[in-house]
Amino acid sequence: MLEGIETGYEEKFDFPYRARPPDRVYMLATLPRTGSTYVSHLLWSSGCLGAPLEYLNFLPGSPYAIAHGQPDKQTALWRSVLQRRTSPNGVFGVKCFSLQLRELQRDNPSLLLEVFATVFSKGRPAQVVRLKRRDSVAHAISYARAALSGVWRKEQEMRATSSVDYSDRAIDEARALLDQQEADWDMLFEEIGVEPLTLWYEDVVAQPDAAVQEVASHIGVDVDPAATVAIPEVERQSQDDSKRWAERYSASVPRR
């Protein structure tokens, strides 16, 4: 958990308790540094699309790190969010990175099966929203810089420097890692026969209301303007250093 920062996982942001299973479940399938925190909060703020956060992220430093290495606690948390994070209209969303599913497959396979049974239930159509970035270089630079600096959110920039030494190698490694994670999603959705709705981060930023409507239509729910909820605001990180990295990487490509 980021000390002193409201991440949205706090109890005060829960929806009213729901004893029965959600009526509709969807997965926001994406990769790190796609702007997924912004997009997940955008969908959540509608009050009609659940609160699609990373409920399967148990790594140290994450909001649910308390369950790291403890399968029973992980399963209990998953079951509790289904009751606490389903919006009043019966919609539950979960944001996932493909790496998180791989980690579950290795460390808690029974929970992975439970998640799949919930999201890809035979009793209802599987709904997946896939979030991507068009600019693969900018995506890799964002990932590389965050990994090197340890700064993943705007709020952290006030506590640590987000400026790091430029590295061609870090960008190349980030591109390879992100490509592999995208391939993992491709393989999964082909295997289970799911055709996701694809959102592009650049389009969501340009037309956020349209993106919310598109997701709602895909899931099969109406957006009620009166249902909006107040949640933590997501601020965009500084882009100055990223632009310098992009210029240097672009200049280096013909020589590599």
Image (tube, rainbow, N blue to C red):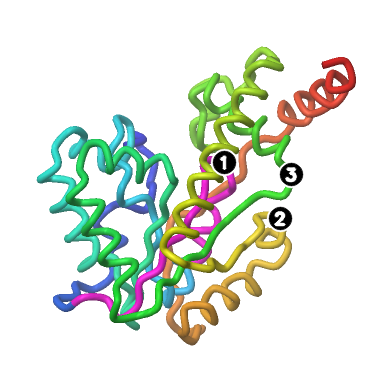
Query: Element under label 1?
Result: loop
Q: Mark 3, residues whose alpha carbon is within 10 Å: few (<14), some, or many (≥20)?
A: few
Instruction: List x then y, in percent, for residue 164.
Output: 63, 16
Q: Which of the marked residues, 2 or 1, is nearer the chain's N terminus?
A: 1
Q: Are marks 2 and 1 in contact (CB under 8 Å)?
A: no
Q: Which of the marked residues, 3 or 1, is nearer the chain's N terminus?
A: 1
Residue at x 70%, y 67% (from the top left corner): 207
Q: Which residue is mark 2?
A: 202
Instruction: Work out how far the residue at label 2 is from the one at label 3, CA to CA, in angstroms.
Output: 9 Å
Picture layout, residue 88 above or below residue 232 = below
Q: Which of the marked residues, 2 or 3, is nearer the chain's N terminus?
A: 3
Q: Which residue is mark 1?
A: 33
Instruction: List x then y, in percent, for residue 215.
Output: 54, 73
Q: Are marks 2 and 3 in contact (CB under 8 Å)?
A: yes
Give amino acid for label 1. Arg
Between 240 and 68, the one lying in front of the other is 68
Give amino acid for label 3. Asp
Between 173 and 203, the one lying in front of the other is 173
Residue at x 65%, y 33% (from the top left corner): 140
Residue at x 16%, y 51% (from the top left corner): 75
Give amino acid for label 2. Glu
- Which portion, as a residue range, is magenta? 21-43
Q: Are marks 3 and 1 in contact (CB under 8 Å)?
A: no
Q: Quadrant of the C terminus?
A: top right
Instruction: List x then y, in percent, for residue 234.
Output: 53, 50
Residue at x 47%, y 78% (from the top left corner): 219
Instruction: Point out which mark residue 1 bears.
Output: none
Q: Mark 2, residues whose alpha carbon is within 10 Å: few (<14), some, or many (≥20)?
A: some
Q: Quadrant of residue 104?
A: top left
Instruction: Work out how far the residue at label 3 is from the one at label 1, CA to CA, in angstroms.
Output: 12 Å
Q: Which residue is mark 3?
A: 135
